[in-house]
Each structure stands twice: as structure tokens, then as C-alpha cells.
Image: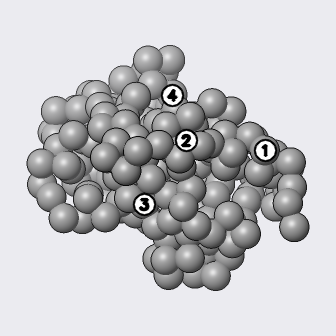
Amino acid sequence: MSSSWQSHPPYSNTKKDDDLIKYHASCYCGLIQYVIYDEFPVDSTYCHCHGCQILQGAPYQWACIFPKTSLYFTSGLDSLEFYNNSENTQNHILPCKVRCKQCSSPLADEGRRMWLAFPQTFKEFRASETIREKLKPSCHIFYGQRTILGDFLKGDGLPKFEAHKNKSKQILDE
Ligand SMILES: [Zn+2]
Ligand SMILES: [Zn+2]
């Protein structure tokens, strides 16, 4: 069954040359597979907000931001599941969470133009320290909502914003 979201990026993107692939991403069970053609994300952040903590099942979320036009899905479009938190619906309303129907692992947060990928889903991320360095976060956001584990990141040298990047007060990093 095809829905209207399938006719928009990143789902409608055309395949590029395999040599241009920088990252291979997949959900835990492997049903969903996609590739990214950009080496460096537009930005990379750690988000400590309550929503990320609960929906991610983690003390904070690490997201690497890529334009939706830089992706190509190689399999699993039928296994995608969406969640828009402001409407509390699984309809594809942006921005939304994207995960696998089968294994429930979170793949990304989908914005209007940007795709906030979770780098733990990249094969290359797990294999190489050099790659992890390329994807390194520029800052912490919603650090005001951090858990006790977020406190372990104090002194890592990255700016720590109480809420949105460059739009909220910075929390002293000591
Ligand atoms: Zn899966
Ligand atoms: Zn968040």
C-alpha cells in the first residue's frame, strides 16, 4: 500500500552511484536499510529533553542531521512506522519519529527538510573511531532537562544549552 509520504524525499529519492555512499544505516532487525551520501552532517547534537529520553529509552539522544535529499532507502519502506508527538498519532505528520514496525528500533527524527539520524544505526559508525570523530556533536541541547547520566558529560568542552541551540541560555560547563 503506498501513501503520500512515499512520494516525498527521502522516500522518493533516486539511487546514486554506490561509490558515493558514505554511511549504511539499518534498524536492529535489518528490515529497513538506507544509505547516506554526505560525509559530514549539517550538525550533530546530544539532546537531553524528556521526550528524547522516553522515546529513545536512553539518557539522551545523539542525532546527526542530514538533508532529506542526501538519503536513499534500499529496503523496508513498508516496515516504517511513524509517530508525531504533538498530535499523538502514527499518521505521517512532520516532524515525526521514524522506527521499524518489526523490531521497534528508532531510526531517525524526520523534520520538514532535515533527517536527524541516530548514528548508532550506521555500520561505519560501529566500525571506526575516525568515523565517530566526523559525526561528533557540536553541543548539548535541552541540557536543563538532563538526567544524572548527563552530568557525567560536564567538562567535555562542548557548549551546553538549557533548551534550543543558540536560542537559550548556556549552562556553565564545569
Ligand atoms: Zn527492524
Ligand atoms: Zn530531545
CB of mark 2 near ligand 2 (< 8 Å): no
Viewer-proximal residue, 174 or 108? 108
User: Badge 1 is on which residue?
Assistant: 7
User: Badge 3 is on which residue?
Assistant: 25
Q: CA distance from mark 2 to mark 1?
A: 16 Å
The type of residue carrying mark 2 is Trp
Query: In the figure, residue 148 lies in which quadrant?
Result: bottom left
Quarter of the image for the N terminus: give it: bottom right
Question: Residue 150 location in percent, x, y?
Answer: 33, 52
- Going 78% across and 44% down the picture, which residue do you hit? 7
Q: Secondary structure at mark 2?
A: strand
- Going 27% across and 42% down the picture, which residue do you hit? 135
- Going 12% across and 48% down the picture, which residue do you hit? 130
Viewer-proximal residue, 148 or 61? 61
Give the mark, 1 or 3, whose residue is nearer the N terminus: 1
Give the mark, 2 or 4, whose residue is nearer the N terminus: 2
